[in-house]
Amino acid sequence: MEQSVARVRMPAETAGLWYGLLGVLSFSLTLPATRVAVAALDPTIVGLGRALLAAAVGSLLLVLTSQRRPTRAELRGLVVVAAGVVFGFPLLSAWALRQVPAAHGAIIIGLLPLATALVATVRGGERPSALFWLAGIVGSGAVIGFAASGGAGGFQAADIALLGAVAAGAVGYAEGGRLARTLGGWQVICWALLLAAPLACVPVSVAVWQHGVSAPLNAWLCFLYVALVSQLLGFFAWYHGLALGGVARVSQLQLLQPFFTLVASALLLHEQITPATVLVALVVMAAVAVGRRAPVRRAG
């Protein structure tokens, strides 16, 4: 019986890829949902207010399951996670999506997997092969070339914020994946949200006082999605996948996210998908297929 169970047990790297794909699917609706929400609500309310709601739910989970407190070293890492995925990415992307369509934002965010792999090399001790880097550079080059050529409307001021969101997200993802090996995947995001909540309260309170919270139902439904799925539940699967399969390898699945987001934007927001957009998405998908099979050596 034990041998039978062992035969059907999924290898850690394969399981990590499946968990990672579930996280990517969860994140794919983030940009369209954010764009709907910020059309009626202030970007600070959407970008940081979502963290407060997610922190309330996450804190309850930590208490109900009697989780151990993070060590001092883990707390330092959690501060980095909070700065990246609780403050940096949500706030910068929410501001940018008031200026550009979600489809445009999806292309720029397509740089996130390569950036995450770079951070994983520095922070996590992972050593991707030359083929891995070549695939990542080709996919990212297609993204940058598409934006620069005007296929995504050309570079705009909002793209600076989106690139900042990419940098913040990469650091938060890589650090979170590293911490998840000892602290646990869902515990990482819950503790990070709890640490960030007191700081997020001040700007959110000011934004609510200045701009109010009057918004149609669809804006609030989208806000609930980015708070409970994008900021919380999606990270349960994502960080667990990064811990199992390795940050560099699993992060490349996010090259598929722009494609999923473009489809969601067309269905939900009726944004146009041009032939150039489809071509870039196909190039990116080919790049992630190659990168997924390329060797990646993990320390330890």
Image (cartoon, rainbow, N blue to C red):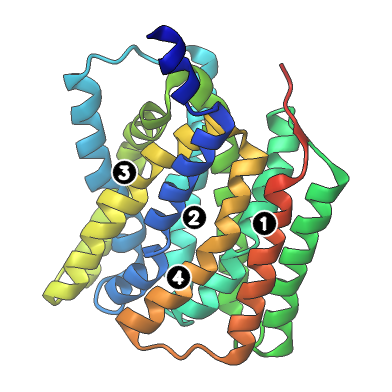
For mark 4, what is the residue? 261
Q: Residue at the top extreme? A: 2
Instruction: Looking at the image, tell me whether mark 3 or mark 1 is earlier in sequence order.
Output: 3
Q: Nearer the viewer, mark 3 or mark 2?
A: 3
Q: Is residue 194 left or right of residue 273?
A: left
Determine whether the residue tagged by mark 1 lies in a helix, strand or loop. helix
| Residue depicted at x 60% and y 79% | 157
CA neighbours of label 4 inside 10 A, class few (<14), some (14 to 19), many (20+): many
| Residue depicted at x 78% and y 48% | 132
Q: Are marks 2 and 4 in contact (CB under 8 Å)?
A: no
Q: Nearer the viewer, residue 214 or 232?
A: 232
Instruction: Looking at the image, tell me whether mark 2 or mark 1 is earlier in sequence order.
Output: 2
Which quarter of the figure has residue 32?
bottom left
* Residue 75 visible to an observer of this rendering: no
Which quarter of the figure has residue 298?
top right
Residue 163 percent across, percent down from the top left: 62, 64
Q: Nearer the viewer, mark 2 or mark 4?
A: 4
CA distance separating discs 2 and 4: 16 Å
For mark 2, what is the residue? 89
Q: Amino acid at mark 4?
A: Thr
For mark 3, what is the residue? 233
Q: Nearer the viewer, mark 3 or mark 1?
A: 1
For mark 1, what is the residue? 289
Q: Are marks 2 and 1 in contact (CB under 8 Å)?
A: no
Q: Nearer the viewer, mark 2 or mark 1?
A: 1
Determine whether the residue tagged by mark 4 lies in a helix, strand or loop. helix
| Residue depicted at x 66% and y 77% | 280
Q: Nearer the viewer, residue 119 or 289?
A: 289
CA distance separating discs 2 and 1: 26 Å
Q: Amino acid at mark 3?
A: Leu
